[in-house]
Image: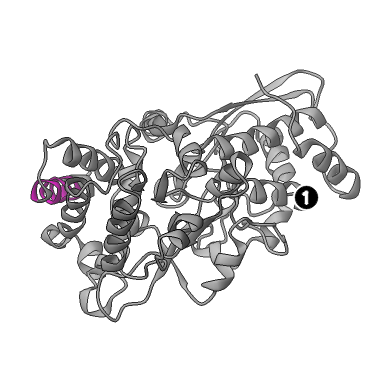
Amino acid sequence: MKTKGFLIGAAVAAGVMLTGCSGSASGDEQTTLSFYSTATSEEDKQVVKEAVLAFEEEYPSIDIEDNYPGDGYENMARVKMAADDMPDLFDTHGWAKQRYGDYVADLSEMEWTERLDPALDTILKDDEGKVYAFPLNQAKDGINYNVNLLEEYGIEPPSTFDEFMEALRTVKEKSNGEVTPLWFNGSDKSAFGQYFDQFSTPLLVTDEENSYESELLDGSFDWSHYTYLPEKLKQMQEEGLLNEDALTAQIQQRAQLMAQGKIAFVFGGGSIGTAVEELNPDVEVGVIPMPTIHEGDESSWIGGERHTVAIAHNTEYMEEAKQFVEFLARPEVAKKVAEGTSLPAGLTEIEADNYFAEYFNEYQGVKVQPYFDRVYLPSGMWDVMGSTGQELLSGTMSPEDVSEKMSEEYTRLREE
């Protein structure tokens, strides 16, 4: 059951202040729109649910059936794409053009497209001017950490992978094993996918002398160059630098453990800061860009679109679906969603009170690199990255096996 949230007041106020937005759906009959989101953390899901509820309060003849499949999102999408039967509204999660381009309606005639952040142009627009989805927020991913613990143990936020490994070892040593140096919610394979995806960019792309961009794009990449990442993940496990339950832990535990001072580092995403603050305001969560792997390289954020709302090209309820997107694009609503997910908004001129603002300002000159899999890998490889991480830590794959599996699936999926 949906519960009332903080967006309602802002949404109603926005409806009064803004002109050009319809006040009710066409006709008196009840219309139900299906909406699928990739939001996984409870905090991200809650802010989306609150936006949905606020819209339904203002448009009582439209019901939004919001769904959050989590790890099953991509499988759901493949089945529905094969039948050309996508939900009325859905999240393109970084694949607006490459994967979902043929299944989304063109939104270029909508007013908010004039306020689209230019940083998202190459991701959400094409050369003909088609706009593929509305961005609820945009990502600047790095590694989150417990500021209090690092200060207590005298650890500087690491800027290289070697420093990162040393930081993990120091946490284990100085906490006498009471604090998990690096924590994974590995019951969801995407947790390991995040590790591989974010570190693949500094390993294989950003350093000029170790850049394999052309090989990755033309299909000739030698996957033995990837083995470094599974080797390091396995080494972390063997040294006791990961949580013992890394394969079974669930995302719901993450904020609680961080708030209790039991986690030092985590691939957490934007909402973890506010989630920890609500549980324990004395614990501060920081974020660093991705540490470099090759000497002389520069750190980078990993990003692009985070959560979006696209409209199925063949929905029976195009007008109602566009009303929902228009509602989300209102400055007051867009601001609340961005703040609720602790990420920058996807529209310009929205000053969101972001939990990590001081860290983004500290690393202001750091470039944002696109998610590795979205640029260099064929559709379907995200699942492979995650599942091979699970098999690596369960002992059924060696680091070399992981690279071989990645090579096989990369070749197979490119040919499909």
The residue positioned 37% from the left and 46% from the top of the image is: 179
Q: Residues within 10 Å of mark 1 (few under 14, many from 20)?
A: many
Is 390 covered by the magenta stretch?
no
Rendered residue at 43%/35% (across/down) = 251
**What's the coloring here?**
one colour
Looking at the rendering, the stretch of residues picked out in magenta corresponds to: 400-411
**Place of residue 280 in the rendered image (x, y in percent of width and height, measured from the top left):** 59, 43
Figure check: 390 above or below 121 = above
* Front residue of this view, candidates 22 and 14: 14
Q: Is residue 401 magenta?
A: yes
Q: Left of 75 or right of it: where is 214?
A: left
> 342 or 65, which is in the foreground?
342
Residue 283 image point, x, y percent: 56, 50
- Taking 276 as reference, is 149 above or below it? below
The quarter of the rendered structure image containing the C terminus is top left
Judging by the rendered image, the residue that carries numbered circle 1 is 332
Helix, strand or loop for disc 1: helix
Q: Position of residue 184 (x, y in %)?
A: 34, 42
Identity of the amino acid at label 1? Glu
Res 266 seen here: no
Which quadrant holds residue 21? Answer: top right
In x, y percent, where is residue 355?
A: 62, 55
Position of residue 15 in the picture relative to residue 404 (left or right): right
